Amino acid sequence: MKIDIRKIEYSELEDFILANAIPKFKAQQIWDWIWKKSKTDFDEMHNLPKDLKDLLKANFFINVMTLDKIQKSTDGTMKSRLKLHDGHLIEAVLIPVTKDKRFTACVSSQVGCSLSCKFCATGTMDRVRNLDPAEIYDQVVMVNQQSIKSFGHPLTNIVFMGMGEPLLNYNNLLKSIEYIGAEGLGISPKRITVSTVGLSKMIRKLADDNVKFNLALSLHAANDAKRSEIMPINDQNDLESIMESLKYFYEITKNRLSYEYISFKDFNDSIEDANSLARLCRFFPVKVNIIEYNQISGVNFERSKAVSIDNFAKHLREKGVMVTVRKSRGMDIEAACGQLANKG
């Protein structure tokens, strides 16, 4: 029975090569074609002899992701709906900031999501399954090609802020980052950010595994009552446990930490809320990204007024907190934060 060659380890490929009396170095050539050159067709692996290609085709296959739909925003953002080999759909986004020469891919880690955050379109979907490492890798490859074709510039950053909770797909997440990084595309882990709702146990595991990428907490409320109201997972992972795990993560890795904080009108945008947030910034160096809310059908939250966001950010800065206010990108094509849902 054929198996997916991208689901085996290098050692298994090497064993296969040696078992068929083929020179050992051919395993590395095949591996490079797959993960460095992103080839999904054995016939395109040009330095392999025909008999080896035929052997590979007889024993392996490579699942291919296809572009189902692409939408382009007036601000340059591009959202791609991608069809997986089993027909399931996911979304990935290219966010170009051309004046800063920053080109970011926002990639998904799951088909759907199980966490039911009240402000997130993906949270209205069921979690169908985890993505495998190759399916995550393929998103980066495809968005990188779009960036080069449309803007003449390769990706500079990768953020795991698309569909799904990355830490609920832990092993596949780490393996995909290996293939995106030194083992494959060569993207530095310092240019990769993984966003999580705050799974304390898994954050500690990241520290114990001494990962090199950056970590972002989807915070969105700075006290347990409000956070549990919009993010049910907070009932099992309260802010005290999350802060302890993040402190542990920083002490072990020294990797960059940030809080993602969507500002909702009359819910979490008061000066009192800013004071609560400032208290959560005392445990380790952290940057706060304040995000404009993007309206989602059927959800009652509203975007905070610009003056409220400005006053909130100003108050945090006066407290010594590093703050960035992120303008929404791709809102007109529902590609902005919290809007990914495979619609249309």
Image: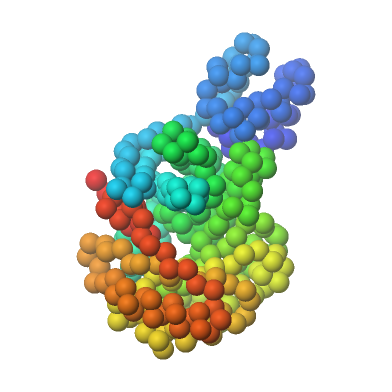
Quarter of the figure that contains the N terminus: top right
Seen at 52% across and 40% down, the residue is 154
In the depicted structure, whether residue 270 falls above or below residue 51: below
Protein image colouring: rainbow
In the depicted structure, whether residue 145 falls above or below residue 25: below
In the depicted structure, whether residue 143 falls above or below residue 225: above
Q: Quadrant location of residue 194?
A: bottom right
Residue lying furthest top in this view? 50
Q: Is residue 247 visible?
A: yes
Seen at 65% across and 26% down, the residue is 30
Q: Is residue 130 visible?
A: no
Question: Is 211 on the left or on the right of 193, as rendered?
Answer: right
Question: Is 288 on the left or on the right of 249, as rendered?
Answer: left
Coordinates of residue 299 in the picture (x, y in percent): 25, 68
Residue 191 vs residue 42, the one in the foreground: 191
Residue 188 vs residue 168, the one in the foreground: 188
Seen at 54% across and 47% down, the residue is 156
Residue lying furthest left in this view? 298
Question: Is 299 on the left or on the right of 262, as rendered?
Answer: left
Seen at 50% across and 48% down, the residue is 101
Question: Is 337 on the left or on the right of 302, as rendered?
Answer: right
Coordinates of residue 115 in the picture (x, y in percent): 41, 65
Coordinates of residue 325 in the picture (x, y in percent): 43, 68
> How many numbered tags mark residues here?
0
In the depicted structure, whether residue 155 falls above or below residue 299: above
Coordinates of residue 333 in the picture (x, y in percent): 28, 50
